[in-house]
C-alpha cells in the first residue's frame, strides 16, 4: 500500500477517534447535570459550556418545573446558584435579524432580507417572570441577587437594543460565558440564610421535569392561556 495513502488513513482514523472521544466525554460531563433527552439541544450546549467553565455540576439546575398555585407550573430552562447570587437563563435559537425593546411585549424576527416577519414574546419579560416566580417560593430569595441572562443561539443579529434593565444581559451564545465570568468577578459574595432549602427547591423543580403528567398539564395550561 502506498505510504501516502497509509498516512491519509491514519490521519482520518485519528480525526474520527478524536471526534468520538470528545463526544463521549461531553456526554459523560452532561450526565453530571442532566439527561440527553431533557430540554433542547441549545440548552444542553449551555449546560456543557458552564461545566467546562468550571461551574460545579451540583449548582446547575436544568429544565425546572416550578410549582405555583393550583395546578400551574413555571418552566425554567436553566438556573445556576453561585456565590454572588442566582443566575437564571432564557435560551433562544433564531436566525435573521432580531428587533425589540426591553419593555415591549413582543419582539420581531426578520428573515429573507425583511420579506418574512415573525413575532415572539419578549424573552426579557419572560425571564423576569421566571425570577418573580422563584422569589415567591422562599423568603430567603428576597435578599439574594438575581441575574437574568438571555442567550441567543443561531445565526441571528440583535439590532437596536437599548435600555436593558439592571442585572439583565442580552447576548449571543459566543459571549455567554464571558458574561457569566463578569457576573462572578464583579459582584460581591452574597449571604444565603439557608442553602439547603434553596437547593431542595431547585432539585425538586428539576425532578418535576421527569414527571410526564406535570409536563402535559403545563403544556395544556399554556395552550389554554394562549387561546384566551
Image: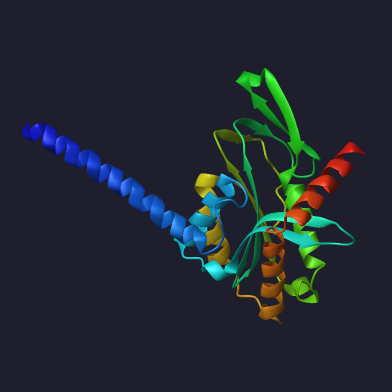
> In what quadrant of the picture does the N terminus appear?
top left
> In what quadrant of the picture does the C terminus appear?
top right
With 167 as the anchor, is 224 left or right in this view?
right
Which residue corresponds to the image point at 54% horizontal and 56% vertical from the top-left? 47
Does residue 205 appear in this view?
Answer: yes
Within the image, what quadrant is residue 179 found in? Answer: bottom right
Question: Is 73 drawn above or below residue 219 in the view shown?
Answer: below
**Residue 177 drawn at (x, y percent):** 51, 55
- Pick the residue in front: 200 or 145: 200
- Pick the residue in front: 213 or 38: 213
Which residue corresponds to the image point at 29% horizontal and 43% vertical from the top-left? 16
Within the image, what quadrant is residue 76 found in? Answer: bottom right
- Pick the residue in front: 139 or 101: 139
With 155 as the anchor, is 102 left or right in this view?
right
Residue farthest to the bottom, as pictured: 193
Residue farthest to the top, as pictured: 115
Does residue 172 appear in this view?
Answer: no
**Residue 151 drawn at (x, y percent):** 61, 47
Which residue corresponds to the image point at 40% horizontal and 50% vertical from the top-left? 23
**Residue 178 drawn at (x, y percent):** 51, 55
Which residue corresponds to the image point at 77% horizontal and 64% vertical from the top-left? 134
- Pick the residue in front: 187 or 145: 145
Residue farthest to the left, as pictured: 2
Amino acid at each position: 500500500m502506498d505510504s501516502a495513502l497509509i498516512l491519509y488513513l491514519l490521519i482520518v482514523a485519528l480525526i474520527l477517534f478524536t471526534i468520538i472521544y470528545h463526544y463521549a466525554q461531553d456526554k459523560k460531563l452532561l450526565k453530571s447535570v442532566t439527561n440527553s433527552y431533557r430540554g433542547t439541544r441549545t440548552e444542553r450546549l449551555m449546560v456543557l459550556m458552564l461545566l467546562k467553565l468550571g461551574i460545579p455540576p451540583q449548582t446547575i439546575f436544568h429544565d425546572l418545573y416550578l410549582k405555583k398555585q393550583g395546578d400551574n407550573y413555571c418552566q425554567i430552562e436553566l438556573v445556576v446558584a453561585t456565590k454572588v447570587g442566582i443566575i437564571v437563563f432564557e435560551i433562544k435559537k433564531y436566525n435573521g435579524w432580531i428587533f425589540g425593546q426591553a419593555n415591549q411585549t413582543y419582539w420581531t424576527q426578520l428573515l429573507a432580507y425583511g420579506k418574512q416577519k415573525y413575532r415572539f414574546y419578549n424573552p426579557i419579560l419572560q425571564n423576569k417572570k421566571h425570577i418573580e416566580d422563584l422569589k415567591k417560593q422562599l423568603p430567603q430569595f428576597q435578599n439574594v441577587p438575581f441575574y437574568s441572562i438571555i442567550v441567543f443561539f443561531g445565526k441571528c443579529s440583535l439590532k437596536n437594543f437599548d435600555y436593558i434593565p439592571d442585572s439583565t444581559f442580552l447576548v449571543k451564545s459566543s459571549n455567554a460565558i464571558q458574561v457569566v465570568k463578569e457576573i462572578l468577578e464583579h459582584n460581591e459574595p452574597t449571604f444565603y440564610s439557608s442553602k439547603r432549602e434553596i437547593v431542595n427547591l431547585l432539585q425538586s423543580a428539576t425532578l418535576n421535569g421527569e414527571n410526564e403528567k406535570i409536563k402535559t398539564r403545563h403544556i395544556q395550561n399554556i395552550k389554554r392561556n394562549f387561546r384566551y
